[in-house]
Image (cartoon, rainbow, N blue to C red):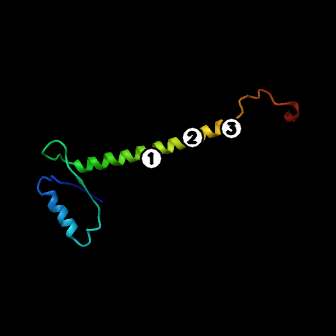
Amino acid sequence: MVLLDLRLPKVDGLEVLRAIKTHKTLVAIPVVIIERLAGSEAFLGQATTLIAVLFLGGVQLISLGILGEYIGRLYDEAKGRPLYIVREAPDSLKE
């Protein structure tokens, strides 16, 4: 997958997209077009920052899913427990 910004500082993003789509080995690669909503100049590391944010969001979703599964299993296990507490074992079980 290619993340492509249309407003690149030195090259037009549409030219890069046309070059990718006319190349016979690169034509099958999906291209996601990103366009800045504010500001005319790209800051250094914008694509890296976007990828890091998306990666950390994915990690957060996966960890929340694992935590939710764990809590759900604890709930199911606790739901099956009796509502009373045995303070002392009967004499027949002490031997």
Label 2: how many Cα within 10 Å (few below 14, some 14–19, many 20+) = few
Kindly report the distance in space between the C-alpha atoms of the residues bearing marks 3 and 1.
Answer: 28 Å
- Quick one: which residue is furthest to the bottom in this view? 24
Q: Amino acid at mark 2?
A: Gly
Q: Amino acid at mark 3?
A: Gly
Locate the C terminus by quadrant.
top right
* Image coordinates for residue 69, horizontal then vertical, percent: 54, 44
Q: Secondary structure at mark 3?
A: loop
Kindly report the distance in space between the C-alpha atoms of the residues bearing marks 2 and 1.
Answer: 15 Å
Q: Sequence order check: which comes first, mark 2 or mark 1? A: 1
Q: Sequence order check: which comes first, mark 3 or mark 2? A: 2
Residue occupying image coordinates x 30% and y 50%: 51
Above or below residue 90? Residue 52 is: below
**Where is mark 3, residue-wise?**
80
Kindly report the distance in space between the C-alpha atoms of the residues bearing marks 3 and 2.
Answer: 13 Å
* Image coordinates for residue 28, horizontal then vertical, percent: 29, 67
- Depth check: give the residue in front, 60 or 34: 34
* Image coordinates for residue 7, horizontal then vertical, percent: 15, 52
In the rendered structure, the answer to whether residue 11 lies left or right of residue 88 reads: left
Residue occupying image coordinates x 12% and y 45%: 40
Label 3: how many Cα within 10 Å (few below 14, some 14–19, many 20+) = few
In the rendered structure, the answer to whether residue 36 lies left or right of residue 71 reads: left
**Where is mark 1, residue-wise?**
62
Q: Amino acid at mark 1?
A: Ile
* Image coordinates for residue 13, horizontal then vertical, percent: 16, 57
Q: Kindly indicate the quadrant of the structure image that contains residue 56.
A: top left
Q: Secondary structure at mark 1?
A: helix
- Quick one: which residue is furthest to the top in this view? 87
Residue occupying image coordinates x 30% and y 60%: 1
Q: Sequence order check: which comes first, mark 3 or mark 1? A: 1
Q: Kindly indicate the quadrant of the structure image that contains residue 78.
A: top right
**Where is mark 2, residue-wise?**
72
